[in-house]
Amino acid sequence: MMFNRPSCFALAAAALVSVLSACTVGPDYHGAPPLAGDAHNLSTFVRTPAAGTSATPAPNQWWLAFNDPQLNDLIAAALAHSPDVHIAQARLRESRSQLQTQRANALPKVSADAAALRMRSPDLSSFGSSDGNGAASSSGRGPLQLYTAGFDATWEIDLFGGTRRAIEAASADAQAVDADLADTQVSLAAEVAQAYIELRDEQTRLELAQRQAQTEQKMLTLTQQRRERGTAADVDVERLTTQVENTRATLIPLDAQLTDSLDRLAVLTGREPGALDEQLAVARPLPALPATVAIGDPSAMLQQRPDIRAAERRLASSNAQIGEHIADFFPKVTLLGDIGFSAGDPGHLVRKSNFSWIGAPYLQWNALDFGRTLGSVHAAEASRDEAEARYTKTVLGALQDANSSLSRYGHQREHVVTLQKVEASASHSATLMRQRYSAGVATLIDLLDTQREEFTAQQNVVAGQAELLKNFVSLQKSLGIGWQAQQAQQG
Protein backbone atom coordinates (compact mmCIF):
# COMPACT_ATOMS: atom_id res chain seq x y z
CA MET A 1 0.00 0.00 0.00
CA MET A 2 1.36 3.42 -0.96
CA PHE A 3 1.02 6.66 1.02
CA ASN A 4 1.81 10.07 -0.37
CA ARG A 5 3.98 12.37 1.70
CA PRO A 6 1.39 15.09 2.48
CA SER A 7 -1.09 12.52 3.78
CA CYS A 8 1.50 10.95 6.04
CA PHE A 9 2.45 14.40 7.36
CA ALA A 10 -1.18 15.26 8.06
CA LEU A 11 -1.78 11.99 9.91
CA ALA A 12 1.37 12.44 11.95
CA ALA A 13 0.40 16.00 12.85
CA ALA A 14 -3.10 14.90 13.86
CA ALA A 15 -1.67 12.12 16.02
CA LEU A 16 0.75 14.53 17.68
CA VAL A 17 -2.03 17.00 18.43
CA SER A 18 -4.18 14.20 19.86
CA VAL A 19 -1.40 13.03 22.17
CA LEU A 20 -0.49 16.51 23.35
CA SER A 21 -4.10 17.55 23.90
CA ALA A 22 -4.64 14.56 26.17
CA CYS A 23 -2.60 16.38 28.85
CA THR A 24 -4.79 18.26 31.36
CA VAL A 25 -3.01 20.24 34.04
CA GLY A 26 -4.43 21.08 37.43
CA PRO A 27 -5.99 18.99 40.20
CA ASP A 28 -8.68 16.50 39.28
CA TYR A 29 -11.92 16.73 41.26
CA HIS A 30 -12.54 13.76 43.55
CA GLY A 31 -15.84 14.73 45.14
CA ALA A 32 -16.87 16.20 48.47
CA PRO A 33 -14.25 16.79 51.20
CA PRO A 34 -13.86 14.06 53.85
CA LEU A 35 -15.22 16.14 56.74
CA ALA A 36 -18.55 16.77 55.06
CA GLY A 37 -18.48 13.26 53.54
CA ASP A 38 -18.64 11.72 57.05
CA ALA A 39 -22.12 13.16 57.45
CA HIS A 40 -23.37 10.86 54.70
CA ASN A 41 -22.81 7.89 57.02
CA LEU A 42 -25.55 8.97 59.45
CA SER A 43 -28.49 6.56 59.39
CA THR A 44 -30.97 8.52 61.53
CA PHE A 45 -31.61 12.09 62.58
CA VAL A 46 -30.50 12.90 66.10
CA ARG A 47 -33.69 14.81 67.02
CA THR A 48 -36.28 12.44 65.53
CA PRO A 49 -39.49 12.53 67.65
CA ALA A 50 -40.53 9.33 69.38
CA ALA A 51 -43.87 9.27 67.52
CA GLY A 52 -45.44 10.72 64.41
CA THR A 53 -42.58 10.14 61.95
CA SER A 54 -41.34 7.31 59.75
CA ALA A 55 -38.05 6.61 58.01
CA THR A 56 -39.71 6.07 54.62
CA PRO A 57 -38.61 8.45 51.83
CA ALA A 58 -40.43 11.76 51.89
CA PRO A 59 -42.65 12.51 48.87
CA ASN A 60 -41.50 15.39 46.69
CA GLN A 61 -44.93 17.06 46.49
CA TRP A 62 -45.40 16.97 50.24
CA TRP A 63 -48.27 19.49 50.20
CA LEU A 64 -50.58 16.87 48.69
CA ALA A 65 -50.69 15.25 52.14
CA PHE A 66 -52.90 18.16 53.30
CA ASN A 67 -55.68 17.14 50.85
CA ASP A 68 -56.43 20.81 50.21
CA PRO A 69 -57.16 21.55 46.53
CA GLN A 70 -56.89 25.31 47.01
CA LEU A 71 -53.42 24.99 48.50
CA ASN A 72 -52.39 22.69 45.63
CA ASP A 73 -53.58 25.26 43.09
CA LEU A 74 -51.77 28.12 44.84
CA ILE A 75 -48.45 26.26 44.94
CA ALA A 76 -48.80 25.23 41.31
CA ALA A 77 -49.50 28.85 40.35
CA ALA A 78 -46.52 30.08 42.35
CA LEU A 79 -44.12 27.58 40.78
CA ALA A 80 -45.35 28.64 37.34
CA HIS A 81 -45.70 32.40 37.69
CA SER A 82 -43.61 33.66 40.60
CA PRO A 83 -41.03 36.31 39.61
CA ASP A 84 -38.49 34.54 41.83
CA VAL A 85 -38.80 31.40 39.73
CA HIS A 86 -38.56 33.42 36.51
CA ILE A 87 -35.38 35.09 37.78
CA ALA A 88 -33.83 31.73 38.65
CA GLN A 89 -34.86 30.27 35.29
CA ALA A 90 -33.27 33.19 33.45
CA ARG A 91 -30.04 32.67 35.38
CA LEU A 92 -30.12 29.00 34.44
CA ARG A 93 -30.52 29.84 30.76
CA GLU A 94 -27.65 32.29 31.06
CA SER A 95 -25.35 29.71 32.68
CA ARG A 96 -26.19 27.10 30.05
CA SER A 97 -25.44 29.62 27.32
CA GLN A 98 -22.07 30.33 28.92
CA LEU A 99 -21.36 26.60 28.94
CA GLN A 100 -22.26 26.46 25.24
CA THR A 101 -19.83 29.32 24.60
CA GLN A 102 -17.00 27.53 26.44
CA ARG A 103 -17.61 24.36 24.44
CA ALA A 104 -17.53 26.35 21.22
CA ASN A 105 -14.16 27.84 22.24
CA ALA A 106 -12.63 24.38 21.87
CA LEU A 107 -13.54 24.30 18.18
CA PRO A 108 -11.97 26.13 15.22
CA LYS A 109 -13.12 29.64 14.42
CA VAL A 110 -13.93 30.13 10.73
CA SER A 111 -14.88 33.40 9.11
CA ALA A 112 -15.59 34.50 5.55
CA ASP A 113 -14.48 37.76 4.01
CA ALA A 114 -14.87 39.60 0.73
CA ALA A 115 -13.63 42.99 -0.42
CA ALA A 116 -13.66 45.21 -3.47
CA LEU A 117 -10.78 47.70 -3.67
CA ARG A 118 -10.63 50.62 -6.07
CA MET A 119 -7.68 53.02 -5.87
CA ARG A 120 -6.02 55.70 -7.95
CA SER A 121 -2.34 56.24 -7.23
CA PRO A 122 -0.73 59.70 -7.60
CA ASP A 123 1.22 60.55 -10.78
CA LEU A 124 4.79 60.80 -9.49
CA SER A 125 6.42 61.16 -12.98
CA SER A 126 5.88 64.92 -12.94
CA PHE A 127 8.41 65.17 -10.13
CA GLY A 128 11.23 63.36 -12.03
CA SER A 129 11.05 64.12 -15.82
CA SER A 130 10.16 66.82 -18.33
CA ASP A 131 9.86 67.24 -22.09
CA GLY A 132 12.32 69.12 -24.31
CA ASN A 133 10.65 72.47 -23.65
CA GLY A 134 11.00 72.08 -19.86
CA ALA A 135 7.34 71.09 -19.26
CA ALA A 136 6.58 68.16 -16.94
CA SER A 137 5.31 65.01 -18.61
CA SER A 138 2.28 62.99 -17.36
CA SER A 139 1.81 59.24 -17.51
CA GLY A 140 -1.99 59.51 -17.30
CA ARG A 141 -2.43 56.54 -14.91
CA GLY A 142 -5.96 55.22 -14.39
CA PRO A 143 -7.48 53.70 -11.17
CA LEU A 144 -6.44 50.24 -9.84
CA GLN A 145 -9.07 47.57 -8.98
CA LEU A 146 -8.79 44.45 -6.80
CA TYR A 147 -11.47 41.93 -5.76
CA THR A 148 -10.92 39.30 -3.05
CA ALA A 149 -13.02 36.56 -1.41
CA GLY A 150 -12.06 33.72 0.91
CA PHE A 151 -12.16 31.97 4.26
CA ASP A 152 -9.80 32.12 7.20
CA ALA A 153 -9.68 29.81 10.24
CA THR A 154 -7.91 29.73 13.60
CA TRP A 155 -7.77 26.89 16.09
CA GLU A 156 -6.00 27.04 19.42
CA ILE A 157 -4.87 23.52 20.24
CA ASP A 158 -5.76 22.70 23.83
CA LEU A 159 -2.33 21.21 24.59
CA PHE A 160 -2.51 21.43 28.37
CA GLY A 161 -6.25 21.33 29.00
CA GLY A 162 -6.93 24.97 29.82
CA THR A 163 -10.01 25.00 27.59
CA ARG A 164 -11.18 21.66 28.91
CA ARG A 165 -10.88 22.95 32.47
CA ALA A 166 -12.89 26.03 31.48
CA ILE A 167 -15.61 23.77 30.07
CA GLU A 168 -15.52 21.68 33.23
CA ALA A 169 -15.91 24.81 35.38
CA ALA A 170 -18.74 26.19 33.24
CA SER A 171 -20.56 22.84 33.36
CA ALA A 172 -20.33 22.72 37.15
CA ASP A 173 -21.51 26.34 37.38
CA ALA A 174 -24.54 25.54 35.22
CA GLN A 175 -25.38 22.59 37.46
CA ALA A 176 -25.03 24.83 40.52
CA VAL A 177 -27.45 27.37 39.05
CA ASP A 178 -29.84 24.52 38.25
CA ALA A 179 -29.69 23.58 41.94
CA ASP A 180 -30.30 27.25 42.84
CA LEU A 181 -33.53 27.11 40.84
CA ALA A 182 -34.56 23.98 42.71
CA ASP A 183 -33.78 25.70 46.00
CA THR A 184 -35.98 28.63 44.93
CA GLN A 185 -38.83 26.21 44.24
CA VAL A 186 -38.40 24.51 47.63
CA SER A 187 -38.48 27.85 49.46
CA LEU A 188 -41.39 29.14 47.38
CA ALA A 189 -43.58 26.08 47.97
CA ALA A 190 -42.91 26.30 51.71
CA GLU A 191 -43.59 30.04 51.78
CA VAL A 192 -46.91 29.65 49.97
CA ALA A 193 -47.99 26.86 52.31
CA GLN A 194 -47.10 28.87 55.41
CA ALA A 195 -48.91 31.95 54.12
CA TYR A 196 -51.97 29.81 53.35
CA ILE A 197 -51.90 28.26 56.84
CA GLU A 198 -51.63 31.72 58.38
CA LEU A 199 -54.63 32.84 56.32
CA ARG A 200 -56.79 29.91 57.47
CA ASP A 201 -55.57 30.40 61.06
CA GLU A 202 -56.56 34.05 61.00
CA GLN A 203 -59.92 33.29 59.41
CA THR A 204 -60.69 30.60 62.01
CA ARG A 205 -59.67 32.78 64.96
CA LEU A 206 -61.61 35.69 63.48
CA GLU A 207 -64.75 33.53 63.34
CA LEU A 208 -64.21 32.44 66.95
CA ALA A 209 -63.84 36.04 68.05
CA GLN A 210 -66.94 37.09 66.13
CA ARG A 211 -69.01 34.29 67.69
CA GLN A 212 -67.68 35.18 71.12
CA ALA A 213 -68.55 38.84 70.55
CA GLN A 214 -72.08 37.89 69.46
CA THR A 215 -72.56 35.71 72.54
CA GLU A 216 -71.32 38.43 74.84
CA GLN A 217 -73.53 40.99 73.10
CA LYS A 218 -76.58 38.79 73.76
CA MET A 219 -75.57 38.55 77.42
CA LEU A 220 -75.15 42.32 77.55
CA THR A 221 -78.62 42.85 76.06
CA LEU A 222 -80.20 40.44 78.57
CA THR A 223 -78.37 42.10 81.44
CA GLN A 224 -79.52 45.53 80.33
CA GLN A 225 -83.10 44.23 80.26
CA ARG A 226 -82.65 42.79 83.77
CA ARG A 227 -81.29 46.13 84.98
CA GLU A 228 -84.41 47.87 83.65
CA ARG A 229 -86.48 45.41 85.68
CA GLY A 230 -84.30 46.04 88.70
CA THR A 231 -82.79 42.55 88.86
CA ALA A 232 -79.27 43.49 87.69
CA ALA A 233 -76.87 46.15 88.84
CA ASP A 234 -75.15 48.84 86.76
CA VAL A 235 -71.78 47.31 87.52
CA ASP A 236 -72.84 44.09 85.78
CA VAL A 237 -73.73 46.05 82.64
CA GLU A 238 -70.42 47.88 82.70
CA ARG A 239 -68.47 44.65 83.14
CA LEU A 240 -70.23 43.02 80.21
CA THR A 241 -69.76 46.14 78.07
CA THR A 242 -66.04 46.05 78.79
CA GLN A 243 -65.92 42.36 77.91
CA VAL A 244 -67.72 42.93 74.60
CA GLU A 245 -65.44 45.79 73.62
CA ASN A 246 -62.31 43.81 74.52
CA THR A 247 -63.45 40.94 72.32
CA ARG A 248 -64.31 43.27 69.45
CA ALA A 249 -60.89 44.88 69.79
CA THR A 250 -59.28 41.55 68.89
CA LEU A 251 -61.13 41.57 65.55
CA ILE A 252 -59.27 44.58 64.17
CA PRO A 253 -55.68 43.20 64.18
CA LEU A 254 -56.92 39.80 62.99
CA ASP A 255 -58.66 41.42 60.04
CA ALA A 256 -55.49 43.38 59.20
CA GLN A 257 -53.37 40.22 59.39
CA LEU A 258 -55.85 38.44 57.14
CA THR A 259 -55.49 41.17 54.51
CA ASP A 260 -51.71 40.91 54.67
CA SER A 261 -51.88 37.14 54.13
CA LEU A 262 -54.15 37.56 51.10
CA ASP A 263 -51.77 40.08 49.53
CA ARG A 264 -48.75 37.93 50.32
CA LEU A 265 -50.31 34.91 48.61
CA ALA A 266 -51.22 37.02 45.58
CA VAL A 267 -47.66 38.30 45.16
CA LEU A 268 -46.17 34.83 45.72
CA THR A 269 -48.29 33.51 42.86
CA GLY A 270 -47.22 36.33 40.58
CA ARG A 271 -50.37 38.43 40.83
CA GLU A 272 -51.18 41.90 42.11
CA PRO A 273 -52.37 42.43 45.71
CA GLY A 274 -56.10 41.84 46.06
CA ALA A 275 -56.30 39.43 43.13
CA LEU A 276 -57.09 36.46 45.41
CA ASP A 277 -59.54 38.21 47.74
CA GLU A 278 -62.64 36.76 46.10
CA GLN A 279 -61.12 33.31 45.60
CA LEU A 280 -60.04 32.95 49.24
CA ALA A 281 -62.73 35.06 50.92
CA VAL A 282 -64.70 32.06 52.19
CA ALA A 283 -63.22 30.91 55.48
CA ARG A 284 -62.11 27.29 55.61
CA PRO A 285 -60.67 25.22 58.43
CA LEU A 286 -56.97 24.56 58.75
CA PRO A 287 -55.60 21.78 56.53
CA ALA A 288 -55.54 18.34 58.11
CA LEU A 289 -52.14 17.19 59.32
CA PRO A 290 -51.11 13.69 58.17
CA ALA A 291 -50.96 11.14 60.98
CA THR A 292 -47.40 10.14 60.11
CA VAL A 293 -44.69 12.24 58.51
CA ALA A 294 -42.17 10.54 56.21
CA ILE A 295 -38.70 12.01 56.79
CA GLY A 296 -36.30 9.49 55.22
CA ASP A 297 -32.76 9.58 56.56
CA PRO A 298 -29.85 12.06 56.64
CA SER A 299 -28.16 10.44 53.64
CA ALA A 300 -31.22 11.01 51.44
CA MET A 301 -31.59 14.55 52.77
CA LEU A 302 -27.99 15.44 51.94
CA GLN A 303 -28.42 14.13 48.41
CA GLN A 304 -31.68 15.94 47.64
CA ARG A 305 -31.22 19.33 49.31
CA PRO A 306 -30.60 21.78 46.45
CA ASP A 307 -28.39 24.13 48.46
CA ILE A 308 -25.99 21.26 49.21
CA ARG A 309 -25.88 20.24 45.56
CA ALA A 310 -25.25 23.85 44.55
CA ALA A 311 -22.40 24.20 47.06
CA GLU A 312 -20.82 20.94 45.86
CA ARG A 313 -21.02 21.97 42.20
CA ARG A 314 -19.45 25.35 42.96
CA LEU A 315 -16.64 23.50 44.71
CA ALA A 316 -16.13 21.42 41.55
CA SER A 317 -16.10 24.59 39.45
CA SER A 318 -13.51 26.26 41.69
CA ASN A 319 -11.32 23.19 41.49
CA ALA A 320 -11.45 23.21 37.66
CA GLN A 321 -10.55 26.90 37.53
CA ILE A 322 -7.18 26.10 39.13
CA GLY A 323 -6.21 24.00 36.12
CA GLU A 324 -7.53 26.69 33.80
CA HIS A 325 -5.02 29.17 35.27
CA ILE A 326 -2.15 26.64 35.50
CA ALA A 327 -2.43 26.12 31.74
CA ASP A 328 -1.32 29.74 31.28
CA PHE A 329 2.19 28.70 32.38
CA PHE A 330 2.63 26.71 29.17
CA PRO A 331 2.94 27.64 25.48
CA LYS A 332 -0.15 28.06 23.34
CA VAL A 333 -0.18 26.78 19.76
CA THR A 334 -2.69 28.18 17.29
CA LEU A 335 -3.16 26.85 13.77
CA LEU A 336 -3.81 29.61 11.22
CA GLY A 337 -5.20 29.02 7.76
CA ASP A 338 -6.56 31.08 4.90
CA ILE A 339 -7.87 30.23 1.43
CA GLY A 340 -9.20 32.66 -1.14
CA PHE A 341 -9.28 34.18 -4.56
CA SER A 342 -8.11 37.60 -5.75
CA ALA A 343 -8.33 39.27 -9.17
CA GLY A 344 -8.53 42.65 -10.82
CA ASP A 345 -11.73 41.65 -12.63
CA PRO A 346 -14.72 40.22 -10.70
CA GLY A 347 -15.50 37.95 -13.63
CA HIS A 348 -12.10 36.23 -13.25
CA LEU A 349 -12.22 35.94 -9.46
CA VAL A 350 -12.79 32.17 -9.12
CA ARG A 351 -10.22 31.06 -11.68
CA LYS A 352 -7.70 28.47 -10.60
CA SER A 353 -4.82 30.79 -11.32
CA ASN A 354 -6.22 33.33 -8.86
CA PHE A 355 -6.49 30.83 -5.98
CA SER A 356 -4.20 31.24 -2.96
CA TRP A 357 -3.82 29.57 0.43
CA ILE A 358 -1.71 29.84 3.52
CA GLY A 359 -1.32 27.66 6.62
CA ALA A 360 0.92 28.21 9.60
CA PRO A 361 1.26 27.16 13.23
CA TYR A 362 1.58 30.06 15.65
CA LEU A 363 3.40 29.60 18.95
CA GLN A 364 2.87 31.98 21.84
CA TRP A 365 4.46 31.64 25.25
CA ASN A 366 4.33 34.22 27.98
CA ALA A 367 7.66 33.11 29.39
CA LEU A 368 8.12 36.03 31.79
CA ASP A 369 5.05 37.60 33.35
CA PHE A 370 6.57 38.57 36.71
CA GLY A 371 4.22 36.35 38.76
CA ARG A 372 0.89 37.28 37.22
CA THR A 373 -0.02 33.71 36.32
CA LEU A 374 1.22 32.41 39.66
CA GLY A 375 -0.92 34.98 41.45
CA SER A 376 -3.96 33.85 39.45
CA VAL A 377 -3.29 30.22 40.39
CA HIS A 378 -2.95 31.07 44.08
CA ALA A 379 -6.18 33.09 43.94
CA ALA A 380 -7.98 30.15 42.32
CA GLU A 381 -6.65 27.80 45.00
CA ALA A 382 -7.89 30.15 47.72
CA SER A 383 -11.28 30.31 45.99
CA ARG A 384 -11.36 26.49 45.96
CA ASP A 385 -10.57 26.38 49.69
CA GLU A 386 -13.36 28.88 50.36
CA ALA A 387 -15.82 26.82 48.30
CA GLU A 388 -14.81 23.71 50.24
CA ALA A 389 -15.40 25.45 53.57
CA ARG A 390 -18.74 26.77 52.33
CA TYR A 391 -19.76 23.26 51.29
CA THR A 392 -18.89 21.90 54.74
CA LYS A 393 -20.81 24.76 56.37
CA THR A 394 -23.82 24.10 54.14
CA VAL A 395 -23.88 20.40 55.02
CA LEU A 396 -23.58 21.03 58.75
CA GLY A 397 -26.21 23.78 58.54
CA ALA A 398 -28.57 21.44 56.68
CA LEU A 399 -28.18 18.78 59.38
CA GLN A 400 -28.85 21.38 62.06
CA ASP A 401 -31.86 22.69 60.14
CA ALA A 402 -33.39 19.23 59.75
CA ASN A 403 -32.78 18.20 63.36
CA SER A 404 -34.08 21.51 64.72
CA SER A 405 -37.19 21.24 62.55
CA LEU A 406 -37.79 17.69 63.78
CA SER A 407 -37.37 18.81 67.39
CA ARG A 408 -39.79 21.75 66.98
CA TYR A 409 -42.32 19.53 65.23
CA GLY A 410 -42.19 16.86 67.93
CA HIS A 411 -42.49 19.35 70.79
CA GLN A 412 -45.30 21.24 69.08
CA ARG A 413 -47.28 17.99 68.68
CA GLU A 414 -47.06 17.50 72.43
CA HIS A 415 -47.95 21.14 73.02
CA VAL A 416 -51.09 20.89 70.88
CA VAL A 417 -52.23 17.83 72.84
CA THR A 418 -51.83 19.82 76.07
CA LEU A 419 -53.71 22.79 74.61
CA GLN A 420 -56.58 20.53 73.56
CA LYS A 421 -56.83 19.17 77.11
CA VAL A 422 -56.93 22.71 78.45
CA GLU A 423 -59.66 23.61 75.96
CA ALA A 424 -61.74 20.58 76.93
CA SER A 425 -61.44 21.48 80.60
CA ALA A 426 -62.24 25.16 79.97
CA SER A 427 -65.29 24.29 77.85
CA HIS A 428 -66.61 21.92 80.52
CA SER A 429 -66.03 24.54 83.20
CA ALA A 430 -67.84 27.20 81.13
CA THR A 431 -70.81 24.88 80.61
CA LEU A 432 -71.11 24.18 84.32
CA MET A 433 -70.80 27.85 85.20
CA ARG A 434 -73.54 28.81 82.74
CA GLN A 435 -75.83 26.30 84.42
CA ARG A 436 -74.97 27.68 87.87
CA TYR A 437 -75.48 31.25 86.68
CA SER A 438 -78.88 30.38 85.20
CA ALA A 439 -79.81 28.76 88.52
CA GLY A 440 -78.77 31.92 90.36
CA VAL A 441 -76.01 30.28 92.39
CA ALA A 442 -73.08 31.91 90.54
CA THR A 443 -72.22 35.52 89.92
CA LEU A 444 -71.80 37.24 86.59
CA ILE A 445 -68.09 37.71 87.33
CA ASP A 446 -67.64 33.95 87.70
CA LEU A 447 -69.44 33.37 84.40
CA LEU A 448 -67.38 35.98 82.54
CA ASP A 449 -64.14 34.52 83.86
CA THR A 450 -64.96 31.02 82.68
CA GLN A 451 -66.12 32.28 79.28
CA ARG A 452 -62.93 34.29 78.89
CA GLU A 453 -60.88 31.21 79.74
CA GLU A 454 -62.86 29.11 77.26
CA PHE A 455 -62.40 31.67 74.47
CA THR A 456 -58.67 31.96 75.20
CA ALA A 457 -58.29 28.17 75.20
CA GLN A 458 -60.07 27.89 71.85
CA GLN A 459 -57.87 30.58 70.32
CA ASN A 460 -54.75 28.90 71.70
CA VAL A 461 -55.72 25.55 70.20
CA VAL A 462 -56.23 27.07 66.76
CA ALA A 463 -52.95 28.99 66.97
CA GLY A 464 -51.15 25.86 68.22
CA GLN A 465 -52.52 23.73 65.40
CA ALA A 466 -51.49 26.39 62.87
CA GLU A 467 -48.00 26.50 64.37
CA LEU A 468 -47.79 22.70 64.15
CA LEU A 469 -48.74 22.84 60.47
CA LYS A 470 -46.11 25.51 59.83
CA ASN A 471 -43.56 23.36 61.64
CA PHE A 472 -44.52 20.52 59.32
CA VAL A 473 -43.90 22.80 56.35
CA SER A 474 -40.55 23.91 57.76
CA LEU A 475 -39.61 20.26 58.20
CA GLN A 476 -40.35 19.52 54.54
CA LYS A 477 -38.28 22.53 53.52
CA SER A 478 -35.38 21.39 55.69
CA LEU A 479 -35.48 18.00 53.94
CA GLY A 480 -34.98 19.82 50.62
CA ILE A 481 -38.06 18.53 48.82
CA GLY A 482 -40.55 20.33 46.63
CA TRP A 483 -38.40 21.10 43.56
CA GLN A 484 -38.97 20.10 39.95
CA ALA A 485 -36.23 18.96 37.56
CA GLN A 486 -35.55 21.38 34.71
CA GLN A 487 -35.10 20.09 31.17
CA ALA A 488 -31.90 21.23 29.49
CA GLN A 489 -32.56 23.62 26.63
CA GLN A 490 -30.75 22.95 23.42
CA GLY A 491 -28.85 25.91 22.14
Image (cartoon, rainbow, N blue to C red):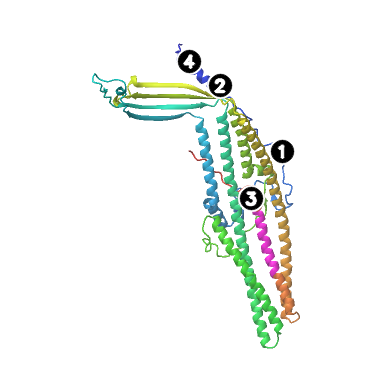
Which residue is at 36% across, 24% downward?
Answer: 341
Circles 1 and 3: CB distance less than 8 Å?
no
Q: Residue at x 74, y 47 (%)?
A: 46
Residue 477 image label: 3
Q: Residue furthest right?
A: 441
Residue 243 image point, x, y percent: 68, 75
Q: Residue, x 59% and y 45% (percent of image)?
A: 180
Q: Are marks 4 and 1 in contact (CB under 8 Å)?
A: no
Q: Residue furthest bottom?
A: 229
* Mark 2 vs 3: CB contact within 8 A: no
Q: Is residue 390 visible to the viewer in this orientation of the structure? A: yes
Q: Is residue 319 above or below residue 277?
A: above
Q: Residues within 10 Å of mark 2 (few under 14, many from 20)?
A: few
Distance of mark 1 from mark 2, alpha carbons? 37 Å
Q: Is residue 339 left or right of residue 18?
A: left
Give yes or no for residue 465 being in the magenta stretch: yes
- Foreground label between 3 and 4: 4
Q: Name the N-terminal-most of marks 3 and 4.
A: 4
Residue tagged by mark 4? 8
From the viewer's perspective, is residue 377 above or below residue 285? above
**Residue type (three-letter) at the residue carrying disc 4:** Cys
Direction from residue 358 to residue 93 in the image, left or right? right
Say which residue label 1 marks.
35
Q: Quadrant of residue 43?
A: top right
First-in-chain label (2 vs 3): 2
Boundaries of the magenta span: 455-473
Disc 1 and disc 3: Cα gap in Å? 24 Å
Packing grade of label 3 (10 A; few <14, some 14-19, many >=20) is: many
Q: Residue at x 64, y 72 (%)?
A: 249
Is-magenta flag for residue 387? no
* Spot occupied by residue 89 in the image (x, y as percentages of width and height): 53, 46
For label 4, count other residues whose C-alpha is less than 10 Å away and answer few (under 14), some (14-19) or many (20+). few
